[in-house]
Image (cartoon, rainbow, N blue to C red):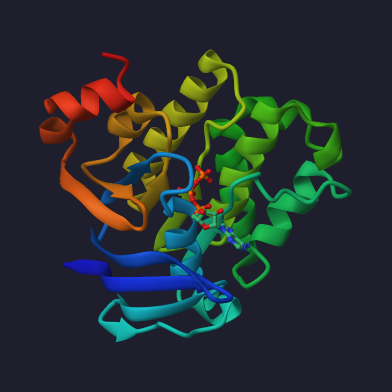
């Protein structure tokens, strides 16, 4: 079943239109990637879904029209956004960040179980549980951002450039954990990623954006086999 659908979505900052008709579908439990060069509109596509930019076109979640919803209304439907730059709260501890992620939930036992799960998924965070967000390394902050998104128990996780600024081995470890999270939780994911190798290790299908429009859409296997993708994104 379709969980999220965008049809011909446009988005503008003031008078500047940066999305010019983006369409994509995320099935229940599916993982979909958005690839593209700097400025292509990847981040704006996630913002269009989470209600932080002015949009046109059609955005439906579980069959319901959500275009124009405020960010808190979108979050209440079960969409968690892990933004570019991670969005961890620098003055709060790792534990407090995790609890903030769960602030809409009332199931105390479930929250405790999920915190344990996060610390098992990201053992580095266990050692830093009392440290402030600001004191963490880039990799640890990214792990915390993903864990905090998971703590909301979303149906859909929007993940923006989880590998940005990380050493290759750290980025790989973060993606391995995200893959495990996907397999074990069944949470659907829509991920923006410049590193196509990492993206293809996680997603089933992807779309490539060029200047605010879909340029190519296909399964990971189809896209990986295309010369233009290999040249532009896979280093050969
Ligand atoms: P990157 O990988 O560089 O983050 P992107 O594909 O995610 O690129 P967006 O961040 O969505 O691209 O940006 C799309 C276009 O919108 C760019 O031309 C960018 O300069 C512009 N833009 C982004 N945010 C704003 C903003 N807050 N105000 C005005 N223009 C913006």
Residue at image coords 22%, 29%: 229
Residue 98 on image: x %, y %: 69, 51
- 134 over 19 or under it: above or below: above
Q: Quadrant of the C terminus?
A: top left
In this image, 67 relative to 227: left or right?
Answer: right
Q: Residue at x 29, y 77 (%)?
A: 62
Which quadrant: the N terminus?
bottom left
Determine the image quadrant of residue 122. Answer: top right
Image-quarter location of ligand 1: bottom right
Is 186 on the left-hand or right-hand side of 153? Answer: left
> Does the rendering let one see residue 153?
no
Expressed as whole percent of the image width and height from the top left, the position of residue 121 reads 53, 33
Q: Is residue 100 above or below residue 170?
A: below
Residue sitting nearer the eye, 115 or 80: 80
Percent coordinates x, y for residue 78 in the rendering? 46, 70
Q: Position of residue 191 (x, y in %)?
A: 40, 47
Q: Residue at x 42, y 61 (%)?
A: 45
Q: Is residue 110 above or below residue 226?
A: below
* Image quadrant assignment for residue 127: top right
Asked whether, in this view, residue 118 is left or right of residue 186, the answer is: right
């Amino acid at each position: 079943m379709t969980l999220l659908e965008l049809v011909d979505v446009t988005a503008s900052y003031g008078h500047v239109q940066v999305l010019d008709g983006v369409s994509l579908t995320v099935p229940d439990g599916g993982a979909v990637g958005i690839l593209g060069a700097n400025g292509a509109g990847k981040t704006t596509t996630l913002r269009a879904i989470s209600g932080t930019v002015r949009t046109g076109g059609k955005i439906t979640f579980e069959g319901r029209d959500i275009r124009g919803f405020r960010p808190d209304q979108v979050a209440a439907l079960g969409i968690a956004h892990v933004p570019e730059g991670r969005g961890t709260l620098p003055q709060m501890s790792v534990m407090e960040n995790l609890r903030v992620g769960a602030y809409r939930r009332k199931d105390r036992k479930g929250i405790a179980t999920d915190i344990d799960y996060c610390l098992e998924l990201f053992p580095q965070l266990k050692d830093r549980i009392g440290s402030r967000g600001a004191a963490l390394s880039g990799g640890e902050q990214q792990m915390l951002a993903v864990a905090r998104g998971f703590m909301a128990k979303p149906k859909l996780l929007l993940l923006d450039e989880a590998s940005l600024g990380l050493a290759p081995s750290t980025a790989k470890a973060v993606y391995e954990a995200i893959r495990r999270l996907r397999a074990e939780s069944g949470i659907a994911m829509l991920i923006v990623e410049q590193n196509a190798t990492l993206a293809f290790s996680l997603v089933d299908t992807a779309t490539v954006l060029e200047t605010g429009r879909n340029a190519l859409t296909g399964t990971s296997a189809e896209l990986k086999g295309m010369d233009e993708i290999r040249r532009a994104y896979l280093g050969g």
